[in-house]
Amino acid sequence: MTWTKASPAIIIAVLFDAIRIFFTFFWFLGPAMAAVACTSAVNNLFEITVATFAGKTVATACTAGASIVGFFGFEFTATFGSVMAMVTGFAGWLIIGIWLLATNSRIFKENALWFIGSLVVSEIPFIDSLPAITIAVWKMYHAQIKKEKLALKQWKDGQVATQLQGRERQVAELMQYQAAQFEQAEIY
């Protein structure tokens, strides 16, 4: 296993963690996105640039409106964000778990607890703002790559020792052959 082969799973884990973190902070990011969308839509509708006074006024009005909606809609946005963060975390955990089982099932031999722990962390509200799936997948691959590099080094060392023994045996056989040739030459 190499980091190049591990990178697709880590990238998917980062994407799911980013989406989950977005939904965890949806109570703040939802109204902010609404303000940006409102400003963009109104400015495009009336072909106003943000640099003009009218553009700044529209941006201020949209931001104020989104802030008011965000304040009074906090219960909805916080609940929606928490539920979506939990759903996204579970979906990401399942997808990455299936991906790992299909492509690299040996990763679970010693690292299954890290993966289960990532599910637990990703499903607890407010703690789910930690990138648990990414950390767990990175830790699992790190341990596997470290273990497999050590095994490869030991195998290479064993191969070198085996080749050295083979060469020594060949030299010994060659010396015996030459000694036999020498004895035969002395006899004749």
Image (cartoon, rainbow, N blue to C red):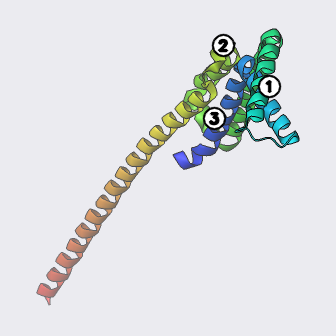
Instruction: Describe the element under mark 3 as helix, strand or loop.
Output: helix
Q: Report the residue marked by disc 2.
A: 126
Q: Residue 146 in the image: state x and y as whole percent.
A: 45, 39
Which x, y percent locates residue 15?
68, 36
Mark 3 sits on what residue?
Answer: 14
What's under tag 2, amino acid-wise? Phe
The span from disc 3 to disc 2 (Cα, nearest Å) is 18 Å
Q: Secondary structure at mark 2?
A: loop
Identify the residue position indicated by label 1 in the image. 62
Dot 1 crowding, Cα within 10 Å, few <14, some 14–19, many 20+: many
Using the numbered discs, state the Cα–Cα distance from disc 1 to disc 3 in whole angstroms.
Answer: 32 Å
48 up-or-down from 177: above or below: above
Say few, some or many: other residues with alpha carbon within 10 Å of mark 3 (under 14 / 14 to 19 / 20 or more): some
Q: Residue at x 85, y 35 (%)?
A: 42
Alpha carbon separation for disc pair 1 and 2: 28 Å
Q: Choose mark 1 or mark 3, whichever is in front.
A: 1
